[in-house]
Amino acid sequence: MHLTRRRALGLAAGATSLAVFGFVPLRARAANAEATDAAIKEFAGGAVPQAGRIVLDAPEIAENGNTVPISVAVESPMTAGDYVQSVMFLADGNPNPSVATLHFSPMSGTAAATTRIRLAKTQNVLAVAKMSNGAVFVDTKLVKVTIGGCGG
Amino acid sequence: MATPKPRVKVPAKAAKGEVVTIKTLISHEMESGQRKDKDGKTIPRQIINKFTCTFNGQPVFWCDMAPAISANPYLEFTAKVMESGTFTFTWLDDNGSVYTAENKIAVE
Amino acid sequence: MKLKIVVPLALGILATGLAAAGLRADPVDDRLVIDGEREIPTRAKAPEGHPFDEVVSGWLYRTEETRALQADSFQNPGMLYVERGAEVWNTVEGAAGKSCASCHGDAAQSMKGVGAKYPKWNEAAGKPFNLELQVDACRKGNMQAEPYKFDSADQKAVVTYIKHQSLGAPVGVDLAKGKMQSWWDRGKDLYYTRTGQLNLSCASCHEQNNGKYIRADHLSQGNVNGFPAYRLKDANIVSLHGRLRGCVRDTRAEMPKGFSDELMALEVYVTWRSTGLVVETPAVRH
């Protein structure tokens, strides 16, 4: 854990402010932790989000917060009786945590998708999947959004 | 902004039961509603808020989008094809405009 | 309580030290193959008289995700502007009732390799022309249409479209024509002249510190073979003069006007500095 932070800090010259944030528990520093939790709760409709089956792919360091590629894949047979209904993306440090909600059907073949999102600053990106039987799964990735140097 | 143009990549053919990858891109600024102009006035939000994909009229995949989706929205997803037919894609703009694209696929 | 202040501060100092020491300084070792089919060389031996031994494409300084965007012609957002440029190419404008296509036909044929040779000496104007100035000259002279406003959407689109027809063609500025050499000389002077409140020259970053990080930007050699380029920061296609103006603004100096003599001289010089590389337009950069 220590090494990871040091490596990350070594990437941004004069990153004193990043250094300060690095020692505050992640969720507590999310600008919109409450709104994020509320969105998950509403989406989950009573089910308790569990870990597993869903994998969110996001870069460790986003070259620019304007365009951050992310993808999601959820294990599922994707049959009429057992499929992924939807996946919600959230960004807990954005002015508004909502990013997108993807809706799948058995005709999707797989519950996998890729898109590009905007991140206002370093924060957690969450992917929450709701299955046809109501079960909910969640994955989180911390994406570091760097402050550029200059140019154009 | 010029009329948003969709670009879609769908394979021309596939085997029955194959899961194909579909890539879509549309030119659109996705004005978030967070930015202010030179005079300090908020630039109103104007985004693509919904994308849909149907195959031979059946819904396959659809997506509700928020301003956090990047400009020139890119969406990649899959579809399992059991027969030949036509994919229809639509993008719904906040201002009510609908942009569409169609791609045929031959399935054997 | 004390640890919360001391350790971050120490790490902050360590971070600065590490960055100054050039941690992770090298551009990556990767190959640009577009759509798995077309290889675009991204390193080359520098030409005679060049300050570097090797010219390296800006592509190699970007993160894996950014590089992947350029390697997929479908995902490359710059291609949206190539498409828009094709539309502009085929659109009639001006009193003469012509489009670019009326004279030049299919750009894939007529413009193949053409953009790679710009900027070019223009005898009639007595100065170098870049693609933008050439397009304006055609609009005015042949189409009886208004020249474009600097960095207008259509200008950027049609120039991206034309330059894209040179994808893979070697960058080549002909310094023997007209007074190109003297413009190169002036461009070189400008390249090495410090300006602005921050007192930086192009060389300060791109020659003396390429490979290092300025805050979190990985500094490249400043080659221009990918312009107009899609910049993630702008989420838009960016012209070369647009980019140069931005750099000057960031040294906190007054920005030269687009297509001014100053920027044309600089364009001649920095295009020469990219000799060895090939056109990558539309490149994807941060």
Image (cartoon, coloured by chain):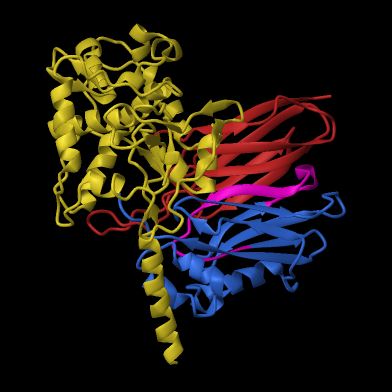
Rendered shade, chain C: yellow
Using residue C3 as the reference point, say whether residue B55 is left or right of it.
right
- Give me the chain that's red: B
Please tell me which residue lies in front, A48 or C281. Answer: C281
- Is residue C218 on the magenta stretch? no
Asked whether residue C75 is in view, the answer is: yes
Q: Is residue C231 above or below residue C182?
A: below
Q: Range of the magenta residues?
A: A103-126
Colour assignment, chain A: blue
Q: Position of residue C277 (x, y in %)?
A: 40, 29
Answer left or right for C96 relative to A74: left
In front of the other: A11 or B2:
A11
Q: Residue furthest bottom?
A: C1
Judged left or right of residue A42, residue C65 is left
Which x, y percent locates residue C76? Answer: 50, 36
Q: Quadrant of residue C53?
A: top left
Q: Is residue C135 above or below residue A33?
A: above
* Residue at 79% across, 26% down: B84
Query: C18 above or below C150?
Result: below
